[in-house]
Amino acid sequence: MIKADSAVKRETKYIAYSCAILSVLMQAVFVILKRWDYTVILGNLLSFAIAVLNFYFMGITVQKAVSMEVNDAKKLMKSSQTLRNIGVFIGIVIGVVAPCFNTVAVIIPVFFPRIAVSFRPLIKDQKEVIDK
Amino acid sequence: MEIAISIILGCCALGAGFAMIAGIGPGIGEGNAVAKACEAIGRQPECKGDVTTTMLMGCAIAETTGLYALVIAILLLFVTPGMFIDILINTIG
């Protein structure tokens, strides 16, 4: 078992917190639309776990790859991406097929890390301004 | 009726397969990005932390394209056929 680097831990924490905030917002939208029930929470939890674990495993792979030879690093990233995609596929299929999960609530949070990464530079800039 | 349902199912499966072509790109892109990061760290080993952080964010963005394709494929396989078959049954009766 490879030990996670501090950069990987920090970024995974950031992604997890951001996903949690965005999940709360999504739940609020469901409540406003009067479509909220327990399947939304279950779907959101499943998808949150998929998104964060996918990012964490990607971080572990990147951490391992940067200390390897160039060609080995390329191969490792490609195989890791394939395996992670298969994992995400299985997770989402379970969410879509099983009736105890809301399909929309399963699909939307998978894209939360992308939104979180988009806001990352803004948060970094704010921190730098505060530090100065 | 059975032929129409078969065509719908076949087209959905084909569409899902075509959608997953987009899944090839992120793998190649991430591989190339990590290769360049390896070279950068080889030149300047003290920048390893910064390079890893930037790499992680870049990979997360590159990964999303594959996830879009994956979600479209899953919807085409598991959600769309049912919708189209319902529409067909309601229309033909």
Image (cartoon, rainbow, N blue to C red):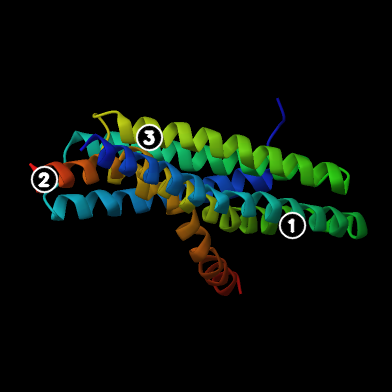
Type of the residue with mark 1? Ala
Task: State whether residue A20 appears in this view.
Answer: no
Depth check, mark 1 against mark 3: the one in front is 1
Q: How many marks?
A: 3
- The answer to whether tags 1 and 3 share a subunit is no
Which residue: 24% across, 39% down? B82
Spatial distance from mark 2 to mark 3, Cα to Cα? 38 Å
Taking A89 as reference, is A82 left or right?
A: right
Quadrant housing the N terminus of chain B: top left
Type of the residue with mark 3? Leu
Taking A76 as reference, is A71 left or right?
A: right
Q: On screen, B49 above or below A72?
A: below
Taking A67 as reference, is A6 left or right?
A: left
Q: Chain of mark 2?
A: B
Q: Chain of mark 3?
A: A
Taking A109 as reference, is A62 left or right?
A: right
Which residue: 84% across, 41% down? A72
Mark 1 and 2 residues: CB-CB less than 8 Å, in contact?
no
Q: What mark, if any, has residue B92 been given in the picture?
A: 2
Mark 2 and 3 residues: CB-CB less than 8 Å, in contact?
no
| Disc 1: which residue | B33
Type of the residue with mark 2? Ile
Q: Residues within 10 Å of mark 1 (few under 14, many from 20)?
A: some
Q: Nearer the viewer, residue A124 or B90?
A: B90
Q: On screen, A66 above or below A87?
A: below
| Disc 3: which residue | A46
Spatial distance from mark 1 to mark 3, Cα to Cα? 30 Å
Which image quarter: residue B33?
A: bottom right
